[in-house]
């Protein structure tokens, strides 16, 4: 399971039957290739986006074998943190020409939330485990996701639920 963030709630229909060209001018990829960027967790998706624009809507994406972003000779300096992958035309075709998606909710970010996540990730206070993410990292109320504890004590929260 993978995640994708978008500024538009209706951006990803279910199922996705056609890849689009990237809309972000700062995306570090070839502009002539349709693709969809995904990451293993919501916080890793957030780190992969610069600059952060809100609102950001969360989609769960069911796809097999997306391509690591670092494998296409693009300069993805933070892929060791973001684990960003791309659904290319080839991946899309290998998945039968259709990819299931699910709208999960929207992010409610406060000032410096992305910086707090980046610092915690670099200090290994947060870990890329999607199955724990919504319980430990995010406060989820209905469909609104916000960071717990104002970005403090990530490591304590992760350890409370186990480190595996």
Image: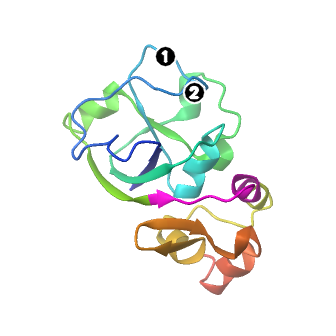
Look at 23% across and 47% down and name the residue there.
14
For the N terminus, the quadrant is bottom left
For residue 31, which numbered disc appears in the image? 1
Nearest the eye: 6 or 95: 6
**Outermost residue, bottom direction?**
160
State the image quarter where residue 138 is shown: bottom right
Label 2: which secondary element: loop
Tell me where the magenta segment starts and ends, as one range.
Answer: 106-118
Look at 54% across and 34% down and name the residue there.
69
Q: Is residue 96 left or right of residue 64?
A: left
Q: Position of residue 157 (x, y in %)?
A: 67, 80
Q: Which residue is mark 2?
A: 27
Look at 64% across and 74% down and name the residue there.
148
Instruction: Check if mark 1's residue and mark 2's residue have beta carbons within 8 Å.
Output: yes
Label 1: few (<14), some (14–19) or many (≥20) C-alpha neighbours in 10 Å: few
In the figure, 81 relative to 68: above or below?
below
In the figure, 135 relative to 16: above or below?
below
Q: Position of residue 13 (x, y in %)?
A: 25, 43
């Amino acid at each position: 399971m993978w995640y994708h963030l978008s500024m538009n709630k209706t951006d990803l229909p279910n199922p996705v039957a056609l890849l689009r060209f990237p809309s972000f001018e700062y995306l570090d990829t070839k502009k002539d290739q349709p693709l969809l960027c995904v990451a293993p967790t919501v916080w890793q998706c957030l780190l992969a986006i610069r600059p952060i624009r809100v609102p950001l809507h969360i989609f769960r994406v069911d796809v097999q074998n997306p391509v690591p972003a670092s494998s296409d000779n693009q300069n993805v300096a933070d892929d060791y943190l973001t684990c960003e992958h791309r659904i290319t035309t080839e991946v899309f075709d290998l998945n039968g020409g259709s990819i299931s998606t699910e709208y999960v909710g929207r992010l409610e970010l406060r000032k410096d939330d992305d910086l707090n996540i980046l610092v915690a990730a670099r200090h290994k206070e947060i870990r890329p485990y999607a199955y724990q993410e919504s319980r430990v990292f995010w406060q989820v109320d209905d469909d609104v996701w916000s960071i717990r504890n104002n970005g403090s004590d990530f490591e304590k929260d992760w350890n409370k639920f186990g480190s595996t």
